[in-house]
Amino acid sequence: MSDPARDAARSAPSSGSSENSDILDMKNEDGWEDAEPDEEETPFISLLDDEVFMDIYAMLNHCKQNYNFDFLEIRQRLALDFYGSIKLVNFIRSQVHRGNKVSPDITLKDIEDEKYLKPVLEDDALLFSLDDLPEVMEGVQGTNGKEVSNESGKLVSRVSELEEELRRIQLQFDNYRASVSETLDDRWNEKGAPGSSGATGTEKEEKRDDDSHYFSSYSYNGSFSSRGTTSLLKCIDIHETMLKDAVRTDAYRDFIYNHKQLFAGKTVLDVGCGTGILSMFCAKAGAARVIAVDNSAIIDKARENIFNNGFADKITCLRGKIEEVTLPVDKVDIIVSEWMGYCLLYEAMLDSVLWARDKYLKPDGLMVPSHMNMWVAPIADPDYIADHIAFWRDVYGFDMKAMQAGIHEDAQVLNMPATTICADPFPFLQLSLHTTTVKDLSFKRKWEAKLKSDIDALDGFIIWFDSFFMPSGEDLVPENARAEEWAKAGKKGVAFTTGPGGKETHWKQGVMLIDNTKETPVARKKGEHLAGVLEYAVPEDNSRALIVGLTWQFDEEKEMSQTWKMR
C-alpha cells in the first residue's frame, strides 16, 4: 500500500525559511525596496464619447484632436483647484449624458453648483487621476487675467502634448524591444533544434560535439527532469527551478553580500552565467567589472536582464565556451560559478571552471564556492520498493514485470526521507576548487559503514554533496565537515547541504537502487559492518554523462557490485 504521508515527505517542498525566502528579498540591504503588487488598471472613458483608453493623456488628447476640446486649457483658464476640477469633469459628463454639445467656453458660473461634486460615472478613473495632471499655474485671474490665462493654458497644453509624445516614443521602444526579444527567441529555437547547432548543412552537423545537447538544454526558458537533457517533455523551466531553489540561490547571495569587501572594486568572472543572477549579485556588491560567459543562447536573456536592472555598464556578456571566448582582461580576482550537477559531477561542467581558474584567476584569487564534500550512505526503504518496484509484479492481478526492465540501471534523483538512511554517512571525497584538477574528477574511493538499525534488506545507496563558500583561498574545510553543522556552529563563510538532513534543493540526492531480483534479499542487524569501493567514471560516448559504480561486502560475505548510469 502507498503511504501518502511518506510520499508527500519525499516530494513536497521542505518547510522552513526556504519556502518563504525570496531570492531577491533584500529587506536587510540598503537600496532594496519591497516590490509593490500589480494593481488592476482602470480604463479612462472619454469625456465626450464612449471611447475607452488605458492612459489619461491618451484620452485627453483624443478629446482635443477630435473635438477641439482642451480639458487642460479650460482647467488652467478657470484656475481650478482639486474640487473645481471634479466639478468640471462631472459638469462635462452630465452635459454629454443629456445629449448636449459641450462648448470649450465653460465659465465658473457653469460649474458653481455643488451637485457637480457627485460623480456622474461610477468609479470614474479620471477623477482618481486628477492629481497626476500638471498643476494649475497661479496668477492667472484678475483684471488682466484673461491674457495671462490663455498663455498659461497654451503652456500647459504644450506640456501635455510633449508628455503624450514621450509616452508614444516609450511605447515604440517597448514594442521594438519585444520584437527584438521575439526575434532572439526564434533564433534560439533554430539553434536549439536537434542537429542544427545554429548552422545548416551536413558538414556542420557532423562536427557537432557531445556538449551541444548540454548547452542547448540551458537555452530554454523551460527545462528539466534531468539537467542536461533536451527532451521537450522534460524541459519544464530549468532556470526558474534553479532560481526558486532558495537554498542554492540564497547561499550565493548571502556569501556575496556578506563579503562585499571581497568584491568591491574587483574583476569577477561568472562561468556559465545562465540568467545573469550571480553576475548581478556581484555587481550589486560593488564589483568594478563582471564578465558573464555562457555557451547557451540564454546569454541573450541574461544580457537583457542585466540591461533592465541597470548593470550594463558593469557586466559584459560573452557567448561561447569559456575555453574558446576571448576575455577583455588577462586576469580576474574572483571566479563565481554554479556548476554543480546531480551527484555533484553529472554534467562535468567543473572541467570548464577549472580550466578558467588555471588560465584567468590571479594567484591570490578566490573561487566561489570553494569546497565540496561528498557523502555516501546505505539506505533501506521497503515502502518505496513496494510502491515503485514490486508494484509491477501485481497490477490489478496482472504480472507486469516487463516494466521493471532497466529500472535498476539508471541512478534516480529523489528527495529521500532521512529515516531511510540505515548507517552514518561516509565522506568519500573532498574537492577544493583552488587545487582540484580534472584528473581528480574520475576516481575510486574506499568507503565503509556500520548499520545503526535492523533492516529487512539493503535496498541501495544514496549520494549527496555539501557546498562551502570560504572568504579566502587559504581557508581549510575538514573533509568530514557537514554543512548543516557548519552553519549552526557559526563558522566563517556560508555552507549548505543537498542531503536529506537539510532543506530540499533541486539537486535532491542521487539514489542507486540495488537489483535484488537476482538474489533473495537478506535481513540485516544493527551493528553489522559493510565496506566497499565507490567509483565515478565518464562514458566515452558522452563526456557530460556519469557512471557510478559501487562494491559492497558485509564482513566475510561475498562481495557484491553494480553500476548505474546518469545520462
Image (cartoon, helix red, strand yellow):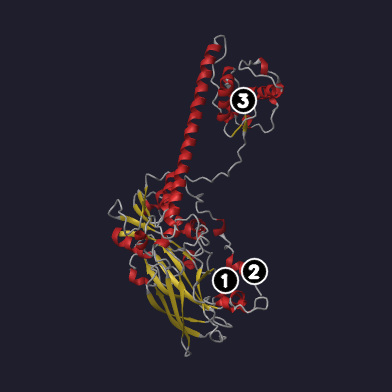
Secondary structure category for the residue under label 2: helix
The residue identified by callout 2 is: 5
Q: Which of the two residues, 286 or 509, is positioned nearer the viewer here?
A: 509
Q: Does 115 sit above or below residue 378?
A: above
Whether residue 301 is visible to the viewer of this picture, yes or no, is no
Packing grade of label 2 (10 A; few <14, some 14-19, many >=20) is: few
Earlier in the chain: of badge 3 and badge 2, it is 2
Q: Which residue is mark 1?
A: 417
Q: Quadrant of residue 369?
A: bottom left
> Which is more N-terminal, label 1 or label 3?
3
* Percent position of residue 285, x then y: 41, 50
**Which residue is under mark 3?**
82
**Residue drawn at point x = 52 percent, y = 80 percent:** 515
Label 3 – label 1 distance at C-alpha: 64 Å
Whichever of callouts 1 and 2 sits on the residue coming sooner in the sequence is 2
Tell me the CA gap for discs 3 and 2.
61 Å
Horizontal arrangement in the rendering, residue 564 relative to residue 401 (left or right): left
Where the C terminus falls, by quadrant? bottom left
Pointer 3 with pointer 2, Cβ within 8 A: no
- Image coords of residue 431 (percent x, y): 38, 69
Report the front residue among 409 and 256.
Answer: 409
Element class at badge 3:
helix
Quadrant for the N terminus in the image: bottom right
